[in-house]
Image (cartoon, rainbow, N blue to C red):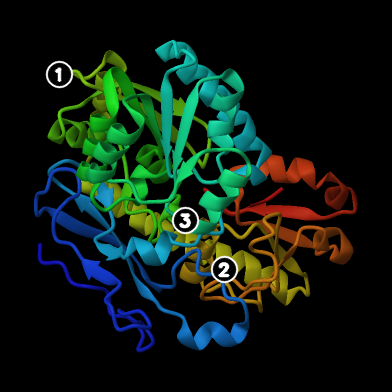
Amino acid sequence: MTLSPTPAPSRWQATDGRGHSVHHLRATCRACSQSTLHRVLSLGAQPLANAFLRAPTDASQEARFPLDLYFCTTCSLVQLADVIDPEVLFAEYIYVTGTSSTIAAHNKEYARTVRERLQLGREDLVVEVASNDGSLLGCFKEFGGRILGVEPARNIAALAESRGIPTVNRFFDERAGSELRASHGKARAVIGNNVLAHVDDTQGFLRGAATLIDDDGAVIVEVPYAREMLLGTEYDTIYHEHLCYFSVTSLAHLAETVGLAVDDVQEVRVHGGSIRVWFRKRSTHGARALEMMAEEASNGLSTLTAWEGFARRASEHRRALRMMLEELHGRGKVVAGYGAPAKGNTMLNYCGIDPTLVPYTVDRNPLKVGTYTPGMHIPVLDVKTLLERSPDYVLILAWNFADEIMEQQQAYRDRGGRFIVPIPTPRIV
């Protein structure tokens, strides 16, 4: 199939302020390198999901890029073909992992599991790639042992350092793996949480990680599971930072290209449903990996037809959500948002939900408060605004933390406030 970019508005910019190109379209699959990509869904030309505006007047400079989803019929990897320069996406970042109690509990369990399975000693090195503010490595630090973060965002790397987490400010690739091994020695574990999906050169990333671990070590990644995305119609998971949407089958193909095997897979209930994948220097995939690949084959996850159905359901969801919000607006009800996550911006832009329908959203992240959402330009206010203004309804944009959010906001519910959970189908609770 010949790939072509989705037509974009005239304000779509393919260069930065210095005239350098920040966008390109790839024609081959990231996992198997074959030219067998088929476009299954177009979410239109969208701004970068984390490109929050400091003022509404900044909108004239807002870049938009095609946001299209492709399926590889060779290895079943679901992915984007439009690639944005990572320097544009990640040099400065406003998502920090330490703002969620759900993630904090998850990190403690994660560190404990890795420590016990690999029998880590005090001299063993644990490296986390895209280590963010160091929240996960902080859990390893509590257990004792050597830690090192690798974080490309300058501001977030500095935040981690200020918290006592040794952090190298750079992007991770094959060269980085070799250089870190030379400077810090071999690692027992290289961890990447929600980073492999952000990488264009996935093969180079895994080669670098494989170079860095010792022969008995493990590369451990967590990625959103394509099965949950498919079954839950989680199209809002799609944004320019997320280049890949993995199944165990596609991860096995990727591992084989770099001499690794999928040793084990665990399902974890974060970010709408994820998998924790253990890569080891072995020649055969583990029993659980083979079992899940068989399940994926039987339930159609690895078929083009399944993803074409996903696209139809995404379109139906857009109509249903808009209909609900327009009906509430017509009755004079006020609907605020909760959260300003990247996924929420995909949904807002795809559904055309602007301040007319959702006049503001609230967030606990101080880096986002006082900004405006990309594309729809909805003001992001402090979470305390929810009780101060008491809107009739709250649309939970960060729906993957819906239970935590509703528990935190019991006072709002006690006043008669109600929540709208948009995924998998819009419902009022």
Classify 10 Å Cα crowding around label 1: few (below 14), some (14-19), many (20 and above): few
Closer mark to the observer between disc 1 and disc 2: 1
The one of 339 and 233 positioned closer to us in this rendering: 339
Q: Secondary structure at mark 2?
A: helix
Percent of width and height locating residue 303: 21, 43
Instruction: Give the residue number, with chain letter if any, for mark 2.
Output: 322
**Does residue 299 appear anywhere in the picture?**
no
Instruction: Give the residue number, with chain letter if any, for mark 1.
Output: 283
Classify 10 Å Cα crowding around label 3: few (below 14), some (14-19), many (20 and above): many
Q: How many marks?
A: 3
Sooner in the amino-acid sequence: mark 3 or mark 2 = 3
Side (left or right) of 356 relative to 172: right
Q: Secondary structure at mark 1?
A: loop
Q: Is residue 274 above or below residue 410?
A: above
**Does residue 83 appear anywhere in the picture?**
yes
Q: Amino acid at mark 2?
A: Arg
Closer mark to the observer between disc 1 and disc 3: 3
Picture residue at 25% right of the left edge, 35% below the top = 251
Residue positioned most to the front: 183
Percent of width and height locating residue 2: 10, 66
Instruction: Give the residue number, with chain letter if any, for mark 3.
Output: 153
Classify 10 Å Cα crowding around label 2: few (below 14), some (14-19), many (20 and above): some
